[in-house]
Amino acid sequence: MEMFFRLIPAVAGLAAAVSLCTFAAGMARASDDARVLFDFADERQSAVWQTVNDNVMGGVSQGGFRITSSRTLMFGGILSLDNNGGFSQIRTRPMLDGLEDFDAIRVRVRGDGRSYWFDLRTTDRLAAGSYRQSFATEAGEWSEIVLPFSKFQFSVFGREVRRAPALRARDIRSLGLTIYDGSDGAFRLEIDRIEAIRQSPENAAGSAPDATETSATDHANGDHGRRVALSVVEGVKADPELSVLAQLLTASGLSEELAGRGSITLLAPGDDAFGAVDGATLEFLGSAAGRDQLRALLLNHVVSGELLLGTEAVRTLGGREVEIAAAGTVKIGDANVQEYRRNPGKWVIVRIDRVLLPAESAIEPASQIERMRSIIELAIRRGVPIFNAGQHEACAAIYEVAIEGLIGQVRDILGEPAHRQVVEAFGRARAIENDAQRAWAYRRILDSVYQLVNEQARRWSAKNSAWQTVGPS
């Protein structure tokens, strides 16, 4: 079996940087209705691609890419389902821009009869999240495939997020290809060219108004004409399926408090979710006597900052740790995510199908600290030998995925200032072109977070915070 591993550019320094910038700026425009993004005529194009295999999460699949003598991109390897693995991906660094006049991707490929995913990442990037669309291939046959932007679906950890914000062409910064079809064995996909095309002027995804001009309401209802809500409370009141929550926010006195906060996420149980709660309990919570318990319950559904669905867990303002999982559907705690709405820089409303009732005691944060330590230790344990073997970009990819998984937890455990510092350092590191230097920059971030987490663990003492039973006494 011929294996495909990416070519590490031999030329470094200013000359390579200039060449890469020249390529990125000079992507050919075949016509007003098509722009060639990649044709692989120049081997320097390999410098903008990177490989991410399931070994970053413990799997053993092997995959990579190379530019062939025929000036095509060959993506191939061996997929393994061992250790809960089963994916291989190649993707570009964030360097695309100016696609607002186009409404589809056209790719010419020769496959092996297996199905693949085409991935698009945007400026509004959520950890482990991308917009994707699948396509089938015919073994040994060249085919030209058109993938409309309107059919790309947002996913996290390979799981579709229902009613996530639609893809906007103007925000696309990176593209990639993934194999994740649930089957073991060799795979091979040859790519001749990738283009952005315009099928019809009125369909360009980039021509849709910005989120600040359109409603961040239920996409399934097709209601895109209402003014976007300025505060999270207005966002709740604008959704007819959150009427009970809107009333409880008012009764608790939290409406003004939440409206005056900075960026927040509201885990919003729908009316059906509250309908499953005992009627006497709801009546008590809505009374003056139950106000304190109502506030505690509602704060159990509020998270500081904009929720990244790719994180493993978040801590609510009520003090409860809530796990996020993607197993068939995206779940927050025991609740399924039904809708994701976002007003960038202000709020996220995640409608869920259950009320997150308080636990009998606050979850000891040591469990989350231990998970953060494990992520860092696993990344370093896998990254160091790969780096020492000369595979610097593969090591950088492992560290990058680990940092993405940590970012949301940094806010919960270490606070907003530390979170801001990590995000800024991550942004600077991702901009480094040299693979070895980028890997070292990521490693310094991981080492810093590891130290801060250990210091925080020493400061925290084990204690339980008892919750009162929700309901009339």
Image (cartoon, grey):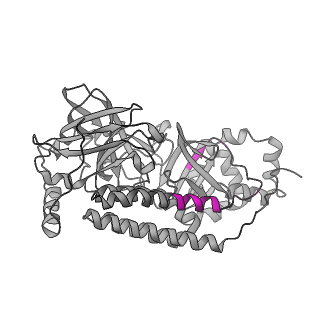
Residue at the spot 48% in from the left edge and 60% down from the top edge: 377
Find out whether residue 369 is within the magenta segment.
yes
| Image quadrant assignment for residue 318 | bottom right
Residue 72 in the figure: left or right of residue 370: left
Identify the residue at the far right of this view.
473
Q: How many marks?
A: 0
**Magenta highlight range:** 350-374
Q: Is residue 380 above or below residue 273?
A: below
Q: Position of residue 85 (x, y in %)?
A: 44, 41
* Residue 256 appears in the picture as rendered: yes
| Image quadrant assignment for residue 154 | top left
Q: Position of residue 382 (x, y in %)?
A: 41, 56
Q: Is residue 374 above or below residue 422?
A: above
Q: Position of residue 255 (x, y in %)?
A: 65, 60
Find out whether residue 56 is within the magenta segment.
no
Q: Position of residue 51 (x, y in %)?
A: 30, 49
Residue closest to the eye, 363 or 427: 363
* Residue 199 appears in the picture as rendered: no
Residue 195 in the figure: left or right of residue 239: left
Residue at the spot 11% in from the left edge and 43% down from the top edge: 31
Residue closest to the eye, 442 or 171: 442
Residue at the spot 20% in from the left edge and 46% down from the top edge: 66
Name the quadrant of the N terminus.
top left
Residue 97 in the figure: left or right of residue 14: right
